[in-house]
Image: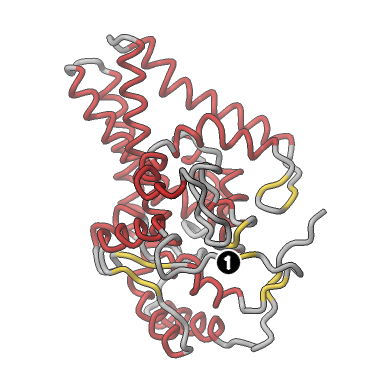
Amino acid sequence: MAEPLKFVDHQHSLFFATVKKRVDHYFKVNQLSKHANHTMIFKTVLFLSLMVGLYVLIMLNIFPIYIQLVLAIFLGITMACIGFNIAHDASHGSYSSNKKVNKLLALTFNIIGANSYIWNIVHNQVHHTYTNISGHDDDIELAKGLVQLSPHQPKNKIQKYQHFYAFFLYGLTTLSWFFRKDYLKFFKKKIGNQRYKHPPIEYFNLFLYKIIYYSLFIVLPLLLLNITWWQFIIGYVIMNVVEGLVLGLVFQLAHLVEDTEIRKAPTDNTIQEAWAEHQMRTTADFSRNSKLITFLCGGLNMQIEHHLFPKICHTHYPKISGIVKETALEFNLPYHENKTFLSALRSHYLFLKG
């Protein structure tokens, strides 16, 4: 079994201890819980209600086909928002202090087509620990052979044009996720560079929830809607392309922009730096002052705060981001930030162009 990477802080950095103390002080002074507040509960009810409402409106079969397509597009966007706002926080245990509540709400990943168990491994354990480390962070592995995200490997002839076609591939994210990626992760020997032995119940859950998703979003529409099979395929693909593009862009803009580092794993599997400082060098915020983007993206536009404090509900990030930025600058650490979504998008484009 391969030895896992480890962070060795020979400099005895006080950055994380200091910023954690200041953030804890903020919650204590203001007598606030680090978990879901009224805003989070409102968002949960809103997005879940929107998903159910849009699905029902489509299945009622009372609208012209072009209206159903528009509803399907909004359904795709809503499911992305559920992933950002509800499932993501719940899977990190930041939604509630009650583990059962977190586990229940994390299952919304399963309902929208993904697998919450595999997400916990790939994202929470691997990505959050080995952020932007080639060969270890699966989140920066995209369409191997087509997209090259690591500067430590040369681009082939096709990849020289990836800044044009990568965005199309982002649109295929959920289709790959729902029909391919989860199965591959379950049956591969390694995730990232680590071996995992999955409990038998998780294999059962994998197929159970996939059947539920396929039944809700493929079988029932084909049986009940007054459309042809090819019209269904067009609608289903467009819905997923929109959802995948939204998901792909938000996650890429947080780690794959001009200023963030992508690192090569050291041969001795030892990273000579504190884990928190590594996060500051490999992560970026965008649109930090936009209430709308923060609301829709589940705080993932404040990815620095999320990586340092994944157990804090994202609705608190706007209040603590100033603390994190001030402390980072005090310790001469980078605080990567794009002021707007468009500037982050441009930076990601230039990153892809290399």
In the image, residue 20 sits, relative to residue 199, either above or below, namely below
Q: Quadrant of residue 180?
A: top right
Q: Amino acid at mark 1?
A: Arg
Please report the residue visible at 52 percent of the width from the left and 71 percent of the height from the top.
279
Which quadrant is the C terminus positioned in? bottom left
Q: Residues within 10 Å of mark 1 (few under 14, many from 20)?
A: some
Q: Say which of 84 and 263 sits in front.
A: 263
Q: Is residue 98 above or below residue 270?
A: above
Q: Give the side of residue 205 with respect to residue 296, left or right.
A: right
Residue 340, percent across and down? 25, 64
From the viewer's side, name the closer residue of 152 and 279: 152
Give the residue pinned by disc 1.
263
Q: Residue at x 46, y 55 (%)?
A: 89
The image quarter in which residue 275 lies: bottom right
Nearest the camera: 345 or 340? Answer: 345
Q: Position of residue 128 (x, y in %)?
A: 56, 61
Residue at the image position 62 percent from the left and 50 percent from the top:
121
- Label 1 sits on a secondary structure element that is strand
